[in-house]
């Protein structure tokens, strides 16, 4: 099967997740993908986004497996800590929980970019796609609530934008973007989206890969949805 226009050495971080798993499976059966490496807490039992040393170890391991990466997808994230629900109001905020959500959703991906970016191909198109969420958009916030998730995704967006500028200096063909995957039926969304139309993970993966495959360096540093439309910061 061949669906992609470009050929990639692909790494999917969060390859055991709902969307990450579907992306990983789609890439594995695509004839244009040379190498498809999953990074998750099953393949790398010590991997933990809240622990920089574990990220360093995974990056070193990858260096031995993959000559260079031309598609890095970060598909990790949490909506709330296990056993608790996202806050509906300021009164529900808990500083420690909020800090942990920032560690997983914003600081962890920033450290991933720190240690994985030396592996990104320099000479031709290379994509870094980080799954964010439309609710991280400040300009689109009309409902309030989910404060830690929204704020951690807004921070993530700033990290992606900043990384895109730095990457472009050494990799002029690179495309580093934040992507909103749509509302997708996964472990993360299921308890909160019973009445909303949800995409199946495989369908979400197909649309996201189509967007990724058609992106050009002119789009680096943007926030796009699963149809390739721009999302306001
Ligand atoms: N589903 C939606 O409707 C939706 C909408 C907008 C945005 N998103 C975004 O899409 C991304 C993927 O979400 P999903 O729906 O696929 O969720 P998911 O099925 O819950 O997958 C989340 C992934 O993140 C990993 N992860 C969580 N905490 C981690 C940690 N501390 N260290 C290492 N890995 C960790 C999980 O690994 P473990 O299994 O080991 O915990 C899993 O691989 C997230 O960034 C989410 O915010 C999803």
Image (cartoon, rainbow, N blue to C red):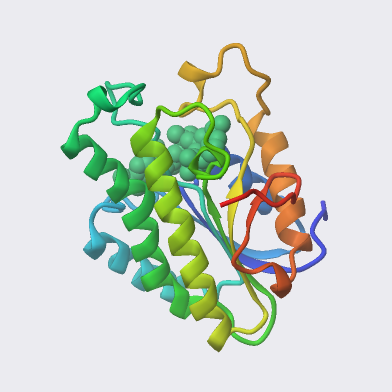
Residue for point 79% across, 62% down: 214
Residue for point 38% across, 62% down: 110
The reply, left or right, for residue 15 in relation to residue 33 is left
Residue for point 23% across, 44% down: 99
Where does ligand 1 appear, by image quarter? top left
- Point out residue 202 in the picture as x, y percentages from the top left corner: 68, 36
Task: Establish if 9 lies above or below 190.
Answer: below
Q: Nearer the viewer, residue 34 or 91?
A: 91
Residue 16 visible, this angle: no
- Point out residue 54 in the picture as x, y percentages from the top left corner: 26, 60
Residue for point 42% across, 67% down: 113
Residue found at the far left of this picture: 96
Residue 150 in which image quadrant: top left
The reply, left or right, for residue 132 in relation to residue 207 is left
- Point out residue 136 in the picture as x, y percentages from the top left corner: 49, 43
The reply, left or right, for residue 25 in relation to residue 80 is right
Residue 78 in which image quadrant: top left
Task: Establish if 151 lies above or below 3.
Answer: above
- Total number of numbered discs in the rendering: 0
- Point out residue 218 in the picture as x, y percentages from the top left corner: 72, 73
Residue 133 visible, this angle: yes
Q: Nearer the viewer, residue 216 or 57?
A: 216
């Amino acid at each position: 099967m061949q669906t992609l226009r470009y050929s990639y050495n692909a790494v999917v971080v969060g390859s055991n997740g709902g969307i990450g798993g579907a992306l990983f499976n789609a890439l594995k059966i695509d004839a244009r993908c040379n190498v498809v490496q999953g990074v998750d807490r099953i393949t790398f039992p010590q991997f933990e986004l809240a622990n920089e040393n574990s990220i360093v170890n995974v990056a070193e391991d990858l260096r031995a497996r993959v000559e260079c990466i031309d598609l890095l997808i970060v598909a990790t994230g949490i909506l709330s800590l296990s056993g608790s629900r996202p806050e509906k109001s300021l009164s529900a905020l808990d500083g420690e929980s909020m800090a942990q959500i920032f560690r997983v959703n914003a600081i962890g991906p920033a450290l991933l970019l720190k240690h994985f970016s030396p592996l990104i191909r320099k000479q031709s198109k290379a994509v870094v796609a980080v799954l964010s969420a439309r609710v991280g958009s400040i300009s689109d916030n009309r409902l309030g609530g989910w404060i830690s998730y929204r704020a951690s995704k807004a921070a993530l967006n700033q990290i992606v934008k900043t990384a895109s500028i730095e990457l472009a200096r050494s990799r002029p063909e690179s495309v580093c973007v934040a992507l909103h995957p749509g509302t997708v039926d996964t472990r993360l969304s299921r308890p909160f989206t019973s009445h909303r139309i949800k995409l199946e993970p495989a369908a979400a993966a197909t649309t996201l890969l189509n967007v990724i495959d058609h992106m050009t360096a002119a789009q680096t540093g943007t926030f796009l949805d699963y149809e390739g439309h721009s999302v306001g910061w």
